[in-house]
Amino acid sequence: MNQKVRQRFCELLGEERVLTDEPMSRHTTFRIGGPADYFLLPENYESISGIIKICTEENLPYFILGNGSNLLVSDSGYRGVIIQLYRNMGEITVEGTEIRASSGALLSAIAAAAKNASLTGFEFAGGIPGTLGGAAVMNAGAYGGELKDVLKEVTAMTREGEILHIPAEKLEMGYRTSIIKKAGYIVLEAVISLKKGNQEEIKAYMRELTERRTSKQPLEYPSAGSTFKRPEGYFAGKLIMDSGLRGYRVGGAQVSEKHCGFVINTGNATAADVVQLMKDVSQKVQEQFGVVLEPEVKFLGEF
């Protein structure tokens, strides 16, 4: 940790928004990860732009973090700057049939705002444990819905600090990808376009999806959600189950017995445990079925 760099961040954000050697296990849903050199909590566009400027001048790598729901951080942590856009940037505003939300807004909070305003179309996202920014980068989806179905536009920042307003049709959204991901843009906010609906029906559908999720997914354990992408023509969880790997363990990491598509932290898993388990699972599935499983989880730090 460089005191001069820390001082620059403190002058920009204030002492209370600059953490050093911050354990990333506190900021990922996996509850795994070593310390980040700098962990910053900006509150507005200007401070994000200022952070990027300092990182560029000091030749520091940076990573944009939401609530860490799709992320495995190395046991040795991250030698660089974590910029968290989460509750510090989580505003949600309903404007007619549209919802404008900052990148740190939780999808569950946006779904609740839509329900309260009797707007339908966002129910599918109510149980996805991520933020809008991460969802836009990855085109998050569940239960037959994807963000691209309801996204109208995204406001993003380039690495040079330029602010872009990108209409949905220019975002090149596909399965777990988008132009935002390819270009390395930072999502600042987005507009979601919904339809007027019946509030009781919206509530009932959201309840039904919650029950399906609770009954089928190991929500009682820390995890990063679906560990592998869905291979063309297959389901990752079924391939893993059919390979005889239900409950398979490496250290504190385990293939969930409830849903084989999830790798869970049973209490003391390390990132090394998870990586080894993923390798073992991929190898066995490829041997048995000739299908290559690609990670859906993102990796951060040295592996």
Image (cartoon, grey):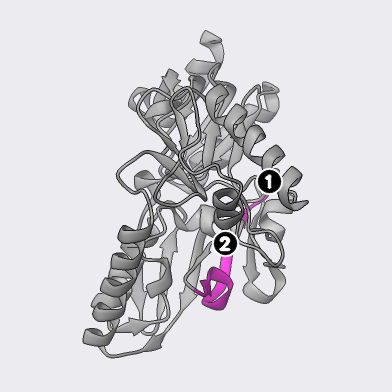
Q: Is residue 157 magenta?
A: yes
Disc 1 crowd rating (10 Å Cα; few below 14, some 14-19, many 20+) is many
- Is residue 282 visible in the rendered image? The answer is yes
Residue 63 x %, y %: 59, 35
Residue 169 x %, y %: 68, 76
Residue 64 x %, y %: 55, 40
First in sequence: mark 2 vs mark 1: 2
SS at mark 1? helix
Residue at (57% x, 62% y) in the render: 155
* Screen quadrant of the N terminus: top right
* Screen quadrant of the C terminus: top right
Residue 155: image tag: 2
Q: Give the range drawn in magenta.
A: 144-158
Residue at (50% x, 22% y) in the render: 38
SS at mark 2? strand
Residue 207, relative to residue 221: is it above or below? below
Residue 18, relative to residue 100: is it above or below? above
Residue at (47% x, 58% y) in the render: 132
Disc 2/disc 1 C-alpha distance (Å): 40 Å
